[in-house]
Image (tube, rainbow, N blue to C red):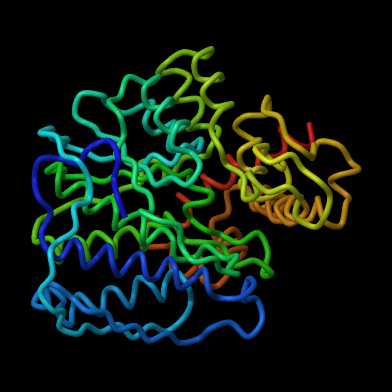
Amino acid sequence: MRAHGGLGGKRPPTVAYDLLDLAATVFNLERQLTGRQRTDPVGSIELRFPARSGRSWSKTALTLVENVLRFLGNAQWRVSTSNRQASEEPELSERYSGRAKRLVLFSGGLDSWCGAAVSSRSDTRLMSFYTRQKAMQADLAADLGYPAPVQWCWRKALPRGRGRSFYYRSFLFQSLAAVTAATLGSEEILQFENGVLASAVAPSPAYRMTRHAHPHFLAMMQRLISLLFRRDIRLHNPFVLTTKRQAAEAAKKAIGLEAAVKAISVTQSCWGYWAPRLQGGGKKRPGKHCGVCIPCIVRRTAFPEGRYARDLTIDRWKNSPACGLHFRAYHGFLERVRDAAEDDARFFLLLDGAARTDLIGRGYQSPSQLRSLYTAFADEFQETFLG
């Protein structure tokens, strides 16, 4: 991997290169799994990697890695190390002498842009991973008054894979953030993600949501990074109790309505943004939001002015077996949320088993915090799609 834009002046510890090797391997492994693994999924994975810094990979550290990966992908992991023959540490980037108190993950999505818009420019650096979004990320950062972001990419193209799931990629993103923060001397890594998607509450039992910004995942990654790097680095999602609309409104207030709307229209939130076809069939222009996937549905509650390939305010698409699938799942779930009103117990029973176990006490102190978040989202959904 390579970082463009310049890492900080501190050289990362040797264990940082091990972490990048491990995270990149997990990312590439998922690309080789066939399909979406909805039936007969992989249940157990054993991974052994040669470590440059064997002493850093204690039993506690390896157990934390296994727990993180199991939480993300719902498979049992057994991770171990072997001794690595001496080799030079690769040069990851050109360097510069700067420091930053905090590091913000900046994907070019709406939430990360909103987070950057409301953050202090003087002591914050942005960090991205990109495939096709390099120029877009850099332009958005410059318009907000930030220096060029640290932008990670693959040194060469990865082997093609059949995988279509993205359960594990957040492990790579947080590992990249940890290495970047170590070179900048940062004390804090911020991942801005609206609470609806960060909480990973499934709208129906048919869904298995990604936990890319789940509070428990961030807490475990914080422990792992602090242990490996032997310094306290805080991982935090300031939007954990915020809907996407509320995040967008905060950004508009911070930089002005006209500038915010212009920038938000450039951000990307769609599962199939570059795909030539819609989920379930039908053509779509690459580089356009589909309008029917879960991220697009949540995005539209914050940015109804955006252009979408399918308009879910029209009954034809709401009732379409393919295009309206996710809309109807959320509609039914959020109607039950609205019916629960101020009743925390009724709301708690609406959550799937994983949400009940993983959220209360692991990011949300009580059901009322989560209920307030989803009640606000339910009202926004109703106003956006049902008038």
In terms of depth relative to the viewer, which is nearer, 122 or 313?
A: 122
Q: Quadrant of residue 207?
A: bottom right
| 199 sits to left or right of 381 | left
In terms of depth relative to the viewer, which is nearer, 203 or 132?
A: 132
Q: Position of residue 168 (x, y in %)?
A: 44, 65
| 109 sits to left or right of 13 | right
Q: Is residue 39 above or below residue 298?
A: below
In terms of depth relative to the viewer, which is nearer, 76 or 241?
A: 76
| 111 sits to left or right of 147 | right
Q: Residue at x 14, y 72 (%)?
A: 52
Q: Position of residue 130 (x, y in %)?
A: 43, 45
Q: Quadrant of residue 137?
A: top left
Q: Position of residue 317 (x, y in %)?
A: 86, 44
Q: Residue at x 26, y 74 (%)?
A: 64
Q: Position of residue 106 (x, y in %)?
A: 39, 39
The C terminus sits in image quarter: top right
Q: Is residue 32 above or below residue 290?
A: below
Residue 380 visible to an observer of this rendering: no
Q: Is residue 53 above or below residue 310?
A: below
Q: Residue at x 45, y 44 (%)?
A: 193
The N terminus sits in image quarter: bottom left
